[in-house]
Image: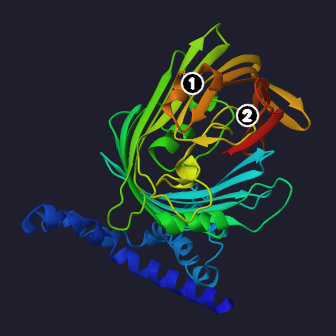
Amino acid sequence: MASLRRFAATASLLAAISLPAFAQPPEATPTPEATPPPEATPPPEATPAPEATPPPQAAPAPQVAPLPEPVAPQPPEPNQPAPPPPAGTGPAEAGPELPPKPADDRILPRLDVFFPEGDLDLRIGRLINEVFFEGQVKYNFISGDITAFLRYRYYSLRRTTQLTVFDSIQFDDIDQSVTDDFDRTRGTLLLLQWPHSYNHRTSFLAELDRISTNKPTEVSRLARIGNTNTFMRYSYQYGTPEDGRSNAIVGEPRARTERLFSAFREIGPGGAGFTTALTYGFPYGFGDYDYLKFQLEALKRFDITQRSFLIGRVSGGSFLYQGKIKPDASAPSPLEPEDSLRIPRGDFFALDGRDGLLGLSKRSRGTEVLFMTWEYFMPWFIERPHRFLWLNWQNWYWILYMGAGTIGFDRKVYSDLSTYIPDAGVGFESSFKLRKYTFFLSGIVAQALKGNGGVEARISVKSYR
């Protein structure tokens, strides 16, 4: 360090001695470039400057003082590249610009949990330029069902392109015994979407599924029909793009985010939504199934008071065309309607569950379905945080629920009023904040008013950040 100080002092003294002699030429050098040389040479008054050299000791003093400051910090910089701030004001200003700031768009998970079904929905996605990468895992820790998705989505000016590969394994429901029988579907799909405006969209879907199973009844069914389902779907969607139920109709049914109520669709006062889709499963090329499927769903919000509102929903579907399976003469009994059609078992309509009647527990499938639900939302408190159980509760709605619907394999069920099943229930929907996450909590207790159905209690938790 002593040698460095001596070297710096010697350099400063040499600079101080040499500066007076060349102090004026550097100031005059820019002028010759802007003006002709003859005008720069004539001023003789600049030459008498040497007469002012006897008192140069006063003039160089201000010039010598700033020089050691930039020279002195230069040697320590290679020795201490990591902490530049303590070197002085100049390096301190440049120091914070060197390390890059941490990116705000980190990979953030989205977690949804549903009870008592035991469904868990975990999604991790990231947007890089115009490309969105997302991984999704749906797992049921009661029955063991698991579905994994990997998506690649590209956003352009007039169209959104999505490529997805997935693998889904479904086990039998746990009633009285636990078995290892499962159905498995692996496939890929291409989804094209044209957003005409924020609320209007048209979509086209092309999908190829490979179906396998180890269930004895399903093995014989696949042996008769085949194990490859190829289909195309054209659809129209009106409403918010963040609508999981409508997106399941126009896009990926297996990847839908299930909800208890319809308010999550972000429907404003007097808002409405409508979705319709036409799916054609063709028995050409790799395809083994043959059907034409039509679906529709509509909902409307009616504002009763300034804060309470009513949401009505109508959903239905029909298989306009159904391919038939040739009867098996060796079969001991005639096939059931569900087993005699060239339709994948997972594509039949269902009336129970979160997307159907909430109070219906008995599983029922068919090719014709129609149901209606009404949800009346009454606020307890809105945007007034309440501290309870170490959580900040932001909103709370009480909900009255009613529904009715029918399902079957014949279109006569639409006109036969005896086939309709009504249900009713009471529920709530709320939101609370925990650190950086906001959670939406929903619950309902409902029961079918016809048949042998019992009381159904359902709860869902959704996370948002």
Tell whether 36 sits left or right of 201. left
Residue in view at x 53 percent, y 50 percent:
347
Residue in view at x 33 percent, y 51 percent:
156
Residue in view at x 77 percent, y 29 percent:
451
Q: Which residue is mark 2?
A: 360
- Residue 39's quadrant in the figure? bottom left
Q: CA distance from mark 2 to mark 1?
A: 17 Å
Locate residue 230, reporting x and y percent. 40, 60
- Residue 443's quadrant in the figure? top right
Specify which label sits upstream in the sequence, 2 or 1: 1
Q: Mark 1: which secondary structure?
A: strand
Q: Nearer the viewer, residue 14 or 370?
A: 370
Tell whether 243 sits left or right of 459. left
Locate residue 22, reporting x and y percent. 32, 76
Image height of 463 relative to 79, above or below: above
Of the numbered discs in the image, which one, if any, rests on residue 313? 1
- Residue 244's quadrant in the figure? top right
Q: Mark 2: which secondary structure?
A: loop
